[in-house]
Image (cartoon, rainbow, N blue to C red):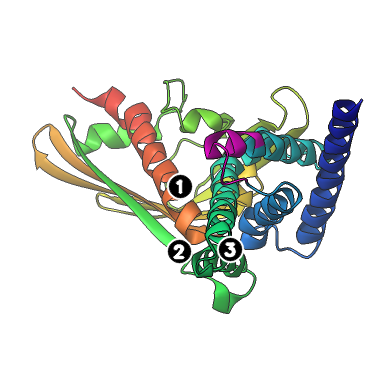
């Protein structure tokens, strides 16, 4: 009977935390703080702090088993609030690493704190780590609390094709069918692309269909990309509109291609994408987005350019 009551109390606490977390996230969305550290650090910090306050880590027991139990409970709360808020799988997958990192840091600081307390030693470290986490949660809530958002990723490659052959390939209809890196497989591909000309002033339209729950809860959106300048062997484009799911994570600014002939049928391509990071904290999302953009450029080079190698 006692075990049954404990089980019931545990699930009541989980359901309560799902409800409270969902309300907090909804408020952050309402006040436009859902791209800041308050969501990506503050919310997991609150959940982990509450759970470790209710069930204090025991320094006399295996810490791995305790952390595993905490992680399972935290995962249930995260998935539960995601369902309540109709969040998509992309958001959940991107949230998971930082979520569990914060949960781990809160747990380990509480675990060490309990261990030190039993020995009656200085507890400065156990208080310092949670304080640092709490302060970092305010990144992105104000311009003065934000780190540089603009970034440009450049990938250079040498291929066995002439500049003219590459330009012909870029002007041809694009059908993105090749296998992508595992990270890119998380993100839906465009289902339709309009515009195959490289004339200055032309606007290319890219259409996306994102099923947040794999087959349902669908978001339709598109990008518009203008050919800004075509000068010699240099092509510059600018994104003039973006209503796709990608616009929630970053603001694409421009794409630039530089074609440098090295030999008769050999060309060096410098492919760069400029964008603004919209999510905080920077230490987590900056390398994540930079990695994704780098892989995207590599995929586009393979799909659009490499087929025209001789």
Per the rendering, the mark at residue 130 is 3
Measure how far apart labels 2 and 3 are at the Cα level. Answer: 29 Å
**Name of the residue lying farthest toward the left:** 263
- Distance Cα–Cα, label 1 vs label 3: 24 Å
Element at label 3: helix
Q: Which mark is residue 288?
A: 1
Q: Where's residue 143, x and y in %? A: 58, 76
**Residue 221 visible in the current orientation:** yes
Quadrant position of residue 39: bottom right
Q: Secondary structure at mark 1?
A: helix
Point out the tag, 2 or 1, that comes first from the N-terminus: 2
Q: Check disc 2 and report the residue beneath it.
A: 150
Ranked by sequence position, the earlier of labels 1 and 3 is 3
Task: Sort mark 3 into few (<14), some (14-19) or many (20+) by Cα contacts within 10 Å.
Answer: some
Callout 2 secondary element? strand
Q: Nearer the viewer, residue 16 or 163?
A: 16
Residue 238 located left or right of residue 137:
left
Closest to the camera, between mark 1 and mark 3, is: 3
Q: Quadrant of residue 295?
A: top left
Q: At 42% from the left edge and 21% from the top edge, which residue is drawn?
A: 179
């Amino acid at each position: 009977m006692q075990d049954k009551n404990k089980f019931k109390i545990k699930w009541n606490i989980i359901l309560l935390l799902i409800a409270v977390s969902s309300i907090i996230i909804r408020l952050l969305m309402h006040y436009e703080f859902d791209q800041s550290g308050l969501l990506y650090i503050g919310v997991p910090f609150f959940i982990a702090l509450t759970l470790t306050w209710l069930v204090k880590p025991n320094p006399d027991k295996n810490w791995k088993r305790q952390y595993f139990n905490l992680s399972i409970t935290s995962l249930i709360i995260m998935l539960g609030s995601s369902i309540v808020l109709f969040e998509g799988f992309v958001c959940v997958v991107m949230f998971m690493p930082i979520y569990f990192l914060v949960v781990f840091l809160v747990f380990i600081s509480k675990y060490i704190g309990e261990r030190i307390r039993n020995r009656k030693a200085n507890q400065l470290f156990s208080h310092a780590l949670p304080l640092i986490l709490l302060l970092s949660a305010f990144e992105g809530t104000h311009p003065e609390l934000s780190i540089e958002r603009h970034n440009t990723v450049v990938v250079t490659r040498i291929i066995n094709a002439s500049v003219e052959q590459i330009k012909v390939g870029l002007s041809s209809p694009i059908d993105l069918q090749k296998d992508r890196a595992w990270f890119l497989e998380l993100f839906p591909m465009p289902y339709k692309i309009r515009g195959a000309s490289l004339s200055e002033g032309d606007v290319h339209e890219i259409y996306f269909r994102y099923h947040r729950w794999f087959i349902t809860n669908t978001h339709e959106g598109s990008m518009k990309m203008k050919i800004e300048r075509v000068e010699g062997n240099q092509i510059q484009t600018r994104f003039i509109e973006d209503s796709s799911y990608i616009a929630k994570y970053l603001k694409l600014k421009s794409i630039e291609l530089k074609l440098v002939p090295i030999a008769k049928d050999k060309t060096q391509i410098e492919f760069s994408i400029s964008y603004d990071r919209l999510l905080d904290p920077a230490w987590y999302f900056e390398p994540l987005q930079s990695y994704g953009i780098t892989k995207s450029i590599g995929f586009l080079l393979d799909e659009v350019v490499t087929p025209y190698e001789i």
